[in-house]
Image: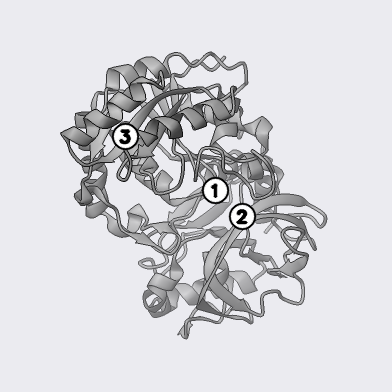
């Protein structure tokens, strides 16, 4: 049974203040000495970095599209084990999910799967009495979604607050917090969302501290904790990456990290470790060698375009990556990793493993995808079906190699990515918890070298 007290922080729309409130709540409760488990609805990699900074625990994603609805509660249980409180930040508007898929992957669906009360964060900057109609509509839209209270954000003055509170008295939902306008807490954004924690370092620490102080000053933490404790126990067993690997030495799997490669789901490293690998993180911006004994390489997503000159300047590491890939070692590259393996990125030399060039584009490619592996690779057997997510503003030419990685079935039919020797490189982000055999297969290929 999963009895962790929990809250889902949602909003009527994006840019209402969900991240400020959710991260601030995590930081405020952690300051009180509570073990807080941070979660994020959807595929986003960046917000969980701020959550981790606030709580000292890995930020974890709950994505019903990529992982399936049956895994949401088990993944939540895995992440929240032993914690005093779990805070789940929603995505987009409360009822927004995968395009054309109804409630699938929406915050509302995840709240129902977790049987968690919802706190609605409302941007009140341009309304007064109308806030009651807005809140009433969201609270009554789906009777299975339990909105337990409201936090008013961007409130201008005491007079404005009084008008909002008077209006919400008629809604029957308590006001659990009021946050005034405070631009000093704003975090810088980029074309794909907030700037990742790894790029901001001390500034990110200051931002999270400021969020926590705002929430501590403006929210009723006791009332919020009491609401969290109303969540009933879940009967779901916790997801576990447990697997009995073959006996013998543990192959070293090098995983790219640092400021240029910040996109990673915590479960991936856990699955690799459970499958028998020794996971070692390295920084392509700083390290001139791969970890000693590297038998396989995982290069996830991030913002290599922001660091193309620095990545290009680290010629010794680029050469080491190229030599490893040409030797036939297993290499799994997603999005930023794909670009790093290309000949060049925005005119700067990269590893040259793939006969392709990459450049920044004005067009944002964003959305869920259905994919099937076109051919065998150390990552997936031909015919393996997975769901994933694309999230980039770059173009790779050509977009697919002689042996593509994936055949896409949504939103249009196409082939994408590269499979050559032991390399599997693609724009597609995947969540291996939905297909743990991917990690097992990868480690087995590493062990076989």
Image-based side of 242 in relation to 316, left or right: right
Residue nearer the viewer, 332 or 449? 332
Q: Name the residue tied to disc 2.
A: 389
Q: Secondary structure at mark 3?
A: strand
Q: Tell me if label 1 and label 2 are in contact, CB under 8 Å.
A: yes
Q: Nearer the viewer, residue 9 or 276?
A: 9
* Residue with the most extreme right position: 383
Q: Is residue 290 visible?
A: yes
| Residue indicated by mark 1 | 43
Counting from the top left corner in percent of width and height, residue 316 is at: 43, 76
Name the residue tied to disc 3. Answer: 152
Quadrant in which the N terminus appears: top right
Is residue 351 placed above or below 296 in the rendered structure?
below
The x, y position of residue 166, in whole percent, is 29, 24
User: Foreground mark, 2 or 3?
Assistant: 3
Mark 3 or mark 1: whose residue is earlier in sequence? 1
């Amino acid at each position: 049974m999963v009895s962790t007290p929990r809250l889902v922080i949602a909003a009527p729309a994006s840019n209402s203040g969900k991240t400020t409130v959710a991260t601030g709540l995590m930081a405020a409760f952690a300051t009180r000495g509570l073990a807080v488990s941070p979660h994020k609805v959807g595929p986003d990699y960046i917000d969980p970095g701020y959550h981790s900074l606030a709580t000292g625990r890995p930020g974890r994603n709950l994505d019903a599209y990529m992982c399936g609805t049956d895994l949401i509660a088990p993944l939540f249980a895995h992440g929240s084990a032993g914690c005093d409180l779990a805070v789940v930040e929603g995505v987009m508007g409360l009822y927004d999910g995968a395009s054309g898929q109804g409630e699938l992957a929406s915050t509302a669906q995840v709240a129902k799967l977790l049987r968690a009360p919802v706190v609605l964060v409302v941007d009140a900057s341009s309304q007064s009495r109308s806030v009651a109609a807005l809140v009433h509509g969201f609270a009554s839209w789906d009777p299975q979604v339990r909105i337990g209270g409201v936090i008013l954000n961007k409130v201008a003055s005491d007079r404005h607050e009084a008008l909002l509170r008077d209006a919400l008295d008629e809604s029957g939902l308590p006001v659990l917090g009021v946050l005034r306008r405070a631009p000093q807490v704003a975090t810088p954004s980029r074309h794909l969302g907030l700037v990742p924690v790894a790029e901001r370092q001390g500034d990110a620490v200051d931002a999270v501290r400021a969020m926590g102080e705002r929430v501590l000053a403006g929210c009723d933490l006791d009332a919020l904790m009491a609401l969290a404790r109303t969540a009933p126990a879940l009967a779901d067993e916790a997801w576990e990456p447990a697997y009995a690997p073959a006996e013998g030495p543990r192959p070293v799997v090098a995983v790219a990290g640092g400021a240029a490669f910040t996109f990673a789901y915590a479960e991936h490293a856990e699955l690799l470790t459970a499958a028998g690998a020794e996971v070692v993180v390295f920084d392509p911006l700083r390290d001139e060698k791969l970890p000693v004994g590297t038998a396989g390489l995982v290069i996830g997503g991030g913002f290599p375009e922001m660091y193309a000159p620095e990545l290009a300047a680290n010629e010794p590491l680029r050469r080491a990556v190229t030599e490893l890939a040409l030797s036939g070692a297993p290499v799994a590259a997603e999005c930023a990793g794909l670009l790093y393996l290309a000949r060049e990125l925005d005119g700067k030399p990269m590893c040259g493993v793939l006969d392709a060039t990459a450049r920044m584009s004005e067009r944002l490619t964003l959305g869920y995808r259905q994919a099937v592996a076109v051919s065998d690779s150390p990552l997936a057997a031909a015919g393996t079906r997975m769901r994933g997510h694309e999230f980039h503003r770059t173009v790779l030419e050509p977009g697919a190699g002689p042996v593509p990685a994936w055949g896409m079935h949504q939103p249009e039919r196409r082939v994408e990515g590269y499979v050559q020797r032991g390399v599997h490189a693609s724009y597609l982000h995947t969540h291996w918890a939905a297909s743990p055999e991917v990690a097992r297969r990868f480690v087995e290929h590493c062990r076989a070298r």
